[in-house]
Each structure stands twice: as C-alpha cells, then as structure tokens.
Image: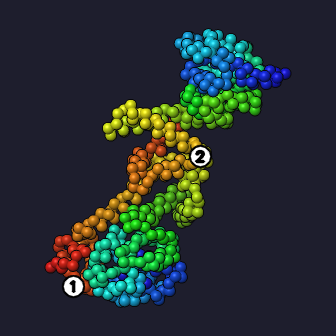
Amino acid sequence: GSGGVVAAAMEASELWVGFVGAGRMAGGLVRGLLQAGKVPASNILASAPSDKNLDAWRELGCRTTHCNLEVVHRSTLVFLATKPHILPGVLEEIRPAVGSHHIVVSLVAGVTIQTLQRLLPPWTKVLRIMPNLPCVVQAGAMVFSRGSNAGDEEAALLKSLLSSCGLCEEVPESYIDIHTGLSGSGVAYVYLFAEALAEGAVKMGMPGALASRIAAQTLLGAAKMLLETGEHPAKLRGDVCTPGGTTIYALHQLEKGALRATVMDAVEAATNRACDMAKD
Amino acid sequence: VGFIGAGQLAFALARGFTAAGVLAAHKITASSPDTDLPTVSGLRKMGVNFTVSNKDTVKSSDVLFLAVKPPIIPFILEEVGPDIEARHIVVSCAAGVTISSIEKKLSTFCPTPKVIRCMTNTPVIVREGATVYATGTHADVEDGKLLEQLMASVGFCTEVEEDLIDAVTGLSGSGPAYAFTALDALADGGVKMGLPRRLAVRLGAQALLGAAKMLLESEQHPGQLKDNVCSPGGATIHALHFLESGGFRSLLINAVEASCIRTRELQHLADQEEISPAAIKKTLLDKVKLESPSLSVASASKVSLFTNKSKKN
C-alpha cells in the first residue's frame, strides 16, 4: 500500500511540506524548521489568499501559491494554518485532493480533531498541534495530539521535525486548551512581566532600554536554570533568598499582591476561553 | 532546675522535662507570688516543689529559668540578684530581653554572671518544642551544651546568634498561635461541609501534624511536597487557588514580621524605660513590691526598668 511511499517521504530532505495559510504562527513554525535545516526551503510550499504574508516566505526561499489545492497536491505533510472561521471552507475545498499518504497537521486554534476528521476523508491521518510564538527563535513550546488514523510513525515524524523549534510533546487532546492558557497565551504574560520589571527599574533610575534588556536576560537566565537544573522552582527561589536580604523583601511584595493567584487566574481564563471558542 | 515564675512556660517546661525523664519532678523548684494561677496546682500535682519565695528557688537551683513576662524581668533580677552566684546558669526565656541588659543588671551583684538567652515555645509541653539559645559573655560552651541537652529533651534545640532571636520569636515563638488559628478555621471548614466538630478538629490537627512530620523527614522542598498532593484538575489545586487569592502566603509572612517587629519594639521600649505600669499585671506588681522593699515604682508615671534608681512615689 502507501506505506513505502510514506517511509520514503519520511526522509526529511525528501519530505514535501505544505502550509495552507501563511500567517504568524505558520511563519514561526517554518522559520524554526528552516533554522534547524531539517527541510530545504525549496521543498516548502505555502498558500495564502493575498501576497501580504507570502512575500516573507519567498524571501526565505520557500515557494508560494494562491491555490490551496496545489499545496495539497504537491505536499505530503500539510500544515493547516488558517484562521478558525476560514478552516471549514478550506477543508471542503481541499478534501477531494486529500489521500491516505497525506499527513494533515492542524495549527488552527479551537478546531478539534473530531471536527477535522469530520470534514476530511475518513482515511486521513490527522494531528493537531498547538505551538507558541517563540518557535521562531527555536525556543517554542508545542503540544500535539493524534487523530484516529495517525500512528506512531506520524507522531515520531512530527516530533522529530518540530523538536528543532523547541519543546515538542505529544499529549491527550484535552491538554491542548490548557497549553493555550499556559504557554500559547503565556508568552504574553511574560512580556507583561518583563515590561513591569523594566518599569520598576526605570522608576529607580535606570534608563529604559538597558532595563528592558536586563529584564529579558533575567527571564531567560532564570528559565534556563529551571530547565537545566531540573530543580523545583520553589527551591531555586529559596536559593536566591538570603536571610533578611533584598530578594525576600521583594517577594513579600509579590505575595502581598497575590501574584500567584492572579497568574493562576490568567491561565484559567485563557484555557476556559479556548474551550469556549472551540465550542463555537 | 528552678523556675522563677509558675505560669504557662514554667508548667510546659517542667511537664516536658519530667515526661522526657531528664529530670525528676522533685529536682524542680518553681516560685511565684501568685498562688492562684491554674498552673500552680498543675506543677504541684506533678511533684514539683512550689514556693512563694523566689530566693528559695535560686538557692536550690543550678540552672535558673526566668519564666516571667518581659516587663517583670528587671524586678526579678533586682530581687534575686544578691543570691546569684558564679555557679548559677541564668536562663532567660523572656521575649525581647537582651543578654546585655540582664548581664548589666546582675553584674552589680555578681561579677561574672552566666547568662543564656533562650526562646522556646509552648509545644515543649508535648516534647515538640522549638528552642533556640544564645550564650552570654560568661557562659561557657559546657553551659550552653547543658541547656541544649535539657531543651533537646523537649523538642528541637539549637544555638544561634542573639540577633536572630527576635525573628525566631516571630516564627516559632508565636508560631503555635498561627497554627491554632489555622486549625480552628480548618475545623470550621470541615463543620461547614458536614463534619462533627470534634472529628473536624482531630482530623485537621492530624493533617498538620502529618504534613509537618513529612517535611521534617523529607529532603524535598515544601513546594515539591505540595505539588505531590495536587493532582491535575483535582480538589487540592482548586483549594490552593483560593488560598493564593486570599494572599495566604503574604499573611503568614506579615504575621512573622509583625511578631518580630513587635518583639523588638517592646525591647526598645524596655530599654527606653517607657513601659507603662498598665503593661504589668497590678496584683503581680504589688506582690513583687512586697518582696522587694528596696525597689519602689512610680505608680503614676513611667516605670523605671533596668536601672537601680529608686523613684519616689
């Protein structure tokens, strides 16, 4: 059957990758893929209704088109990256061209595997992925789930391709909305925090540009230590707090402001919103 | 071992020492001018020698605990000072009272008084106390070790620098009160959700006891132990969110800070001789005055502390 074709296509350099939709998230993913050198740009084809986004893709060396069907015809691995309300129409359009050799990976927020499988031929290998923006700089966090026909090979392929963009883990589909609240939206929480840190420094007399760079580096460094030491964040926090020192005084302020609860509220709100949007 | 004062602290320590078997009750003497204290009968029942004479306690002790409230300390030192000898180890358990203030007072009577300052807490009564101590100028290493042995029999005991003792007061000195408050509220929660009160109290206390024991016996950070209890989307994490929203952590930090600061304030007030007589229980003060005719107190205005000046009424 098609197993041999898929196996051959699994060789990344032979893999033809297509993107239906060429917006920010797709752009992040493709930049990560290209940076990692897993797939040559010439093997990548992206479609979008206008040239607005496609210019950037051409600059990267990718091929572009305005025809979604062409993407499906010329690719084995097809990423769906349209806006949620556009997707049903697009799926209806490409459905006739989708074969059993295709691997369809949806980046579309709020569209469940069940919906995807309903709108695509019954034999389609479907996976759903939720990336986040820092995929662009190969420091992303992505979770994906597989549909009924996607097997270990497809999951392994996706993981191997995207691990170059950052953390890439398979999860039950129910975690995807939570990932949105934690990490998809989460980057925005971090930007907010970084801005506030810098503002505090500016208040105390440091120039803004310097404060911003230091704030970002502080977050980066702290995150790196968390990831590399594997220690519990509470332990790392304690390590920084010398008795009666500056850090514990500052942390007290954060606790007074119920920062922890507020952050939990934020993750909860974004997750719930993702669930609600999926139902729409 | 002698206790000047026969209140909660003396009772708790005496009970702890005797239960631990480090000291027989008849080797303990406690004194107080106030014989109506409920703890007095408790001490008597234990077999502790009770007397109304502080001087008798001093004479029959090697280790002398000053177990009175901080404002009373200067009166006590004035009263028993003449009987303090070089052999005595004077252990002050009074919050906020510095070693130097005690040494200064005693040095008018005894050139090299051995003073140790100690901060313990009420769970010594069940031998789960938390005690720290700092040794004074003339207290030897062995004196410290002797106290440590005694206090270790009733819980955890370690030596610290004196400047940390106020913080210890805020944390483990006052700590049991925070715990009792928490337990009362936890029990209320249980009752609200349908548990009988007694069972709710019992379970709440056991939960805190068990958690504390786990932490003490574990290498892990309390944050990690907390995570271990929180299954994803489960009951506990929902509850914790409520605690965080209420600023639970900051409340506890505030509490420890407030207790520590207040301790320092009281000590500062004492040094400044600004404690009003109202701060001292009147009956006690009258009885102390009876015992020490050399000491007179200005009743209408400020009490003179830590000086030998006698103010006329």
**Label 2: which secondary element:** loop
Q: Which residue is mark 1?
A: B294
Q: Which amino acid is tagged 2? A: Gly
On the image, the x and y values in percent for residue B284 come to 29, 79
> Disc 2 vs disc 1: Cβ atoms closer than 8 Å?
no
The Cα atoms of the two marked residues, 2 and 1, are separated by 67 Å
How many residues crowd mark 1 within 10 Å: few (<14), some (14–19), many (20+)?
few
State how the image is colored.
rainbow
Look at 30% across and 67% down and name the residue there: B267
Q: Of discs 2 and 1, which sits in the foreground?
A: 2
> Looking at the rendering, in which quadrant would you find the N terminus of chain B?
bottom left
> Looking at the rendering, in which quadrant would you find the C terminus of chain B?
bottom left
Q: Which residue is mark 2?
A: A230
Question: How many marks can you see?
Answer: 2
On the image, the x and y values in percent for residue B234 come to 60, 47
Q: Chain of mark 2?
A: A
Q: Which amino acid is tagged 1? A: Ser
**Label 1: which secondary element:** loop
Side (left or right) of B150 relative to B88: right
Res. A195 image quadrant = top left
Look at 67% across and 14% down and name the residue there: A71
Q: Chain of mark 1?
A: B
